[in-house]
Amino acid sequence: MASLELRNLVKIYGRTHAVDGISLTVADGEFLAILGPSGCGKSTTMRMIAGLEHPTQGDILIDGEVVTPLPPRMRNVSMVFQSYALYPHMSVAENIAFPLKARRIPRSDREQKIRWAAGTIGIEHLLARRPARLSGGEKQRVALARALVRDPTLFIFDEPLSALDAQVRAMARSELRQLHDRTGITTVYVTHDQFEAMGMGDRIAIMKDGRVRQIGTPQQMYAHPADTFVASFLGTPPMNLLTQDDHIVGFRPEHVLLAGEAAASGHFHVPARIIRQEFLGAIWQIYAETELRGHTNKLLAQFTSAEVQTLHDGDAVQFMVSPEHLRYFDPGSGKKMDAPHV
Amino acid sequence: MSDATARATRHAGVTDRSTLLGALMLAPAIVYIVALVGIPFLLAIGLSLSNATVGDPGFHTFVGFKNFERVLNDPAFPVALRNSILVTLATLVITIILATAESELFARNFRFKRFWQIIIILPWAMPVSLAAVNWLWLLDSQFSPVDWILVKTGLLGPGGVWGPARHLYYYGREWLGLGSLTLINVWRLLPLATIIVLAGRTSIPHEVFEQAQVDGAGFFRVLFRITVPALMPILVVVTMFTALMVFGDMALIAMTTHGGPGHSTQLIPYLAYVKGVEGGALSEGAAVALFMFPILLAAAIGALRFASRSESN
Amino acid sequence: MNLAIKKRLRRLGFWLGMLFFAAFAIFPTVWMLISAFKQNADLYNAANNPFLFNLPPTLKHITFLFTNTDFSVFLWNSVLIGVMVVIITLLLAVPAAYSLSRLVGRWGERSGIAVFLVYLIPPTLLFLPLYQVISLLRAANTIWALVLVYPTITVPFCTWLLLGFFKSMPREMEEAALIDGYSRWQAFLKVSLPLAWPGIATCVVFAFALSLSDYIYAASFVSETASRPLNSGVPTALIRGDIYFWQSLMAAAAIVTIPLAIGYGLLFDKLIQGFQPEAAS
């Protein structure tokens, strides 16, 4: 149980700045998701926290203590790898026992802990098996049990669900989060999947090009993205970003309304022509093209089936968005800005 | 830094610091090689530049390149050089072709495979001088069973295609002698070459072959368009290995032709041995042996360059 | 062409090829075995069929091998030398290969083929100065001279082999061990080594075989009969001037080769695996 702090973490490989100055704090017991596309530096950051890589600059503090010069075995951090990294020449029980043996924990205590960890994760029936004879989901659980068994200060997950089938993944997600809630261990969860990040994280840190673009709760990040990258990364389908002369205006597809209904004063009006409509069960997705103040943009709107009855491909319509759902971004930097004076 | 961190840092030792540990783990091998290969190599150069003999093995007199001149003027040397290159090249070509063919067979599954594996690995299991003696008798000028078969099949003997004599003097003729040396080399190195090629062959994913099957390619097309190109990197390894083992070997010639008749089947390693040990002129022996080095180096560079080019393709 | 006929032809081709290679490999040995039991009058008669016992076979020459020569001594020396060379090779090559693959950065990984550069300096070049080194160490004429020197032949090869092995082993296992609480050295011992055992097994076989493939060091460094290994001992004992004790020579070769061939042959697939790290994981 401890807090984690990263101070100005930098990692340079040759001439590439894989991590370019990251500072953040994870509170004791918090579940932080680090989200970003591949190559954004999240894996490197995670490896530095674990001690597998040495930062070029900066410090890592666990519970207020600087751990930067320490090797992994002295940090009391547990990690679940993307490939699970189970030792193939050992049985499941021996895999789980391995970290305990490193700490010279006597056999009787070891067996008790193994039973506890296996019980918590629900894999008692697998203890005698070898990793080669486990399914993907089972391997993931063994990796979890191995990470859990020594009561670490910090949990690190490296895309642990990406190797699982889609169906298993949703269940595993829920179980992982529940495990965290039960044990209260501070967790850093690295992923490229926004559903995992949003669904599991107390807070999310979005990274790109070695920097943290924004950090906050899922709701904050979704409603108030700090730049166009975050705005288009979170949310499926992504936020509409319409280029204008000196700014970019953004709004989410589900906030698009059909003009012509009630009082629309102050609403942002967008004339558009419908290109395609997609029926997706609970919702319709409308692909449209807009022509606004000389700029052509693509637009995506989401409606429930009731609202869509009257629309056809090729129709010219007026969409509108309520001002509270509008976000503005600077076209040069992508960063958010205040509403421009019209 | 707190006390706990400070204490912990002091305990993070050698076994944690990868670079230091790496150096320590690498050191014994490096020290050994430097001591028993590097330094003797320099000593060999020193020997070749001195006038050391078996009776007087010191380095005291520097004679410059006199030994090399003497070697170059020795009529045996150009023959030895030519022969070494010829035998090596011939062995290489034949071994690689046969190894590729053999690996095609052993890449498949068939009954009693273990049995056949034991059989074909046998030549490699024979200690080299015993193999030489085996072949010495096998190709003996009087009692060779090979000749006996050739006579029985009418290729040798009166009216025979290969001459009226009942025997071929395998070790007593220049080209027969060189051919025999090549044959023995191929015989003893083929198992090793086959194993290495097989390693490359079986790591070609079988989807590639299945795709070729679907595309309707026949055996030979698959072999030449798919298998061989995929085997290129491993063939480079086999080539280097085989070339080094053949070029540097002197056991076979020491047991069979002894370089004769005259010097016509002489090989460089044996020439070095004869001059250095039997002749007593250590410095000349070293000079001859040193001639091997630039040839091997050039070949190695060529092989490496070929390897990196084919890897980037 | 008819599919069934094509299949038949293919099988025929396969077995023809196999027979060719098998015959090529084993013909000398089969004949050698037969000769070992032949009486002199039978062997030294050019008119006789060399593949048949024209006179009844005899054990005389094999007995001669064991009673009149130091063959058993040579055998024992070779085994002893082989075992010790294997041990020394593993002690040098395994850590070196691991270090190159993991611990010393990019250039270490690329040094694979570079290791072969050591072989550019072949024994026929080194034996002269090495003899001086051996004499200095007072090891001349003992088996220790060979034990000391053979690893120069075996270590580069085994290092290259194991380097490929360690390189293809996923780093994550060792990293998991580090995180689980082990130091680099312990992770090497407890995780990397056990997983590299096919490569190590191959190295054992190759190191042993390579120590039996040297003639020049054996011939140059050891003249004391009792310390000779097979390669130099057998020819010296059984070729006296112009007289070749062929049957005993053949018997010696057979006694050594057949068990080794069986041993290596049974490990055939493992040997291939040793060259093939990707398939191992």
Image (cartoon, coloured by chain):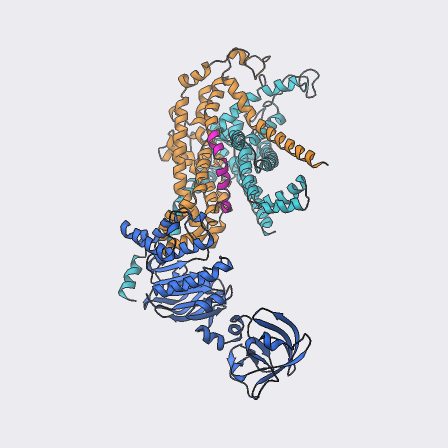
Chain colours: A blue, B cyan, C orange
Quarter of the image for residue A179 reads: bottom left
Point out residue B133 in the picture as x, y percentages from the top left corner.
51, 23
C215 relative position to A102: left or right:
right
The reply to whether residue A31 is visible in this rendering is yes
Position of C7 relative to B130 (above/below)? below
Quadrant occupied by the N terminus of chain C: top right
Q: Nearer the viewer, residue B305 or A199?
A: A199
Total labels drawn: 0
Q: Is residue C280 magenta?
A: yes
Q: Is residue A138 magenta?
A: no
Position of B215 relative to A148 (above/below)? above
Magenta span: predominant SS is helix
The reply to whether residue A185 is visible in this rendering is no
Point out residue C214 in the picture as x, y percentages from the top left corner.
47, 32
Position of A190 relative to A117 (above/below)? below
Point out residue A269 in the picture as x, y percentages from the top left corner.
60, 84
Q: Nearer the viewer, residue C193 or C4?
A: C4
Q: Nearer the viewer, residue B96 or A29?
A: A29
Quarter of the image for residue C148 reads: top left
Q: Which residues are magenta?
A: C262-281
The residue shown at (35%, 62%) is A69
Furthest-right residue in this view: C1
Point out residue B34 in the picture as x, y percentages from the top left corner.
42, 43
B272 relative position to A296: left or right:
left
C152 relative position to B137: left or right:
left
Q: Nearer the viewer, residue B107 or B43?
A: B107
